[in-house]
Amino acid sequence: MSGPFEERSGVVSCATPWGCWYQTLEEVFIEVQVPPGTRAKDIQCSLQSRHLALAVRGQDVLKGRLFDCTIADEGTWTLEDRKLIRIVLMKTNRDAGNCWTSLLENDYAADPWNPGFDFSGAEISGNYSKGGPDFSKLEK
């Protein structure tokens, strides 16, 4: 289920039991709420091309096979204000049609009607790199 629209960035976050995740065409962002006072040494985070594992103080928080491939060397995590872990993953497939429908293969699905993108201000031309209908002659 999606959360509220974030007007500044143009994304809709997908709420989860541990926080939320959202995406752009190029990246996937994961925000995990952790107990206040958490220290970096309390966190074990493994970012691989198709797998993610996050544990805090020895307890698994998030673990599984990612929906699609990422560039493992470019994945990062940070601990912010000792209460939020932010993970950024770089998608390998950055085509306009590559919208992840879930964070993990079978978990944390995006809202199918709005999978993390807001197109309310977009102009639809129908022209994109892989073809498509030409809507340029339609009246606005």
Image (spheres, rainbow, N blue to C red):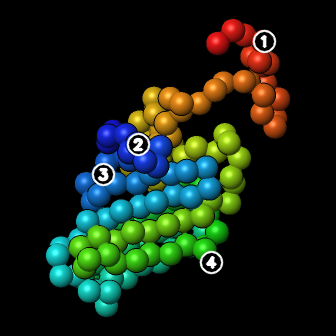
Instruction: Read off the residue under disc 1.
Output: 137
Q: Is residue 6 left or right of residue 68?
A: left
Image location of residue 70, percent across then percent down: 61, 64
Q: What is the distance, in whole Å, between disc 1 and disc 3 at their CAs?
A: 42 Å
Q: Nearer the viewer, residue 83 or 61?
A: 83
Q: Residue furthest front?
A: 140
Mark 4 or mark 3: whose residue is earlier in sequence: 3
Instruction: Read off the residue under disc 2.
Output: 7
In which quadrant will I find the C terminus?
top right
Question: Is the residue under label 3 in contact with that under label 4 (CB below 8 Å)?
Answer: no
Q: Is residue 97 above or below residue 76?
A: above
Q: Residue furthest left?
A: 36
Label total for image = 4
Type of amino acid at the residue the image marks with label 2: Glu
Question: Is the residue under label 3 in contact with that under label 1 (CB below 8 Å)?
Answer: no
Assess disc 1: are there few (<14), some (14-19) or many (≥20) residues with their C-alpha within 10 Å of its C-alpha.
Answer: few
Type of amino acid at the residue the image marks with label 4: Asp
Q: What is the distance, in whole Å, between disc 1 and disc 2 at their CAs?
A: 30 Å
In which quadrant will I find the N terminus?
top left
Instruction: Read off the residue under disc 4.
Output: 73
Image location of residue 98, percent across then percent down: 64, 45
Assess disc 4: are there few (<14), some (14-19) or many (≥20) residues with their C-alpha within 10 Å of its C-alpha.
Answer: few
Viewer-side label of 4, 1? 1
Q: What is the distance, in whole Å, between disc 4 and disc 3 at their CAs?
A: 26 Å
Instruction: Read off the residue under disc 3.
Output: 16
Q: What is the distance, in whole Å, between disc 3 and disc 2 at their CAs?
A: 20 Å
Q: Is residue 59 visible?
A: no
Question: Is the residue under label 4 in contact with that under label 2 (CB below 8 Å)?
Answer: no
Type of amino acid at the residue the image marks with label 1: Lys
Find residue 40 and report its image quarter.
bottom left
Type of amino acid at the residue the image marks with label 3: Thr
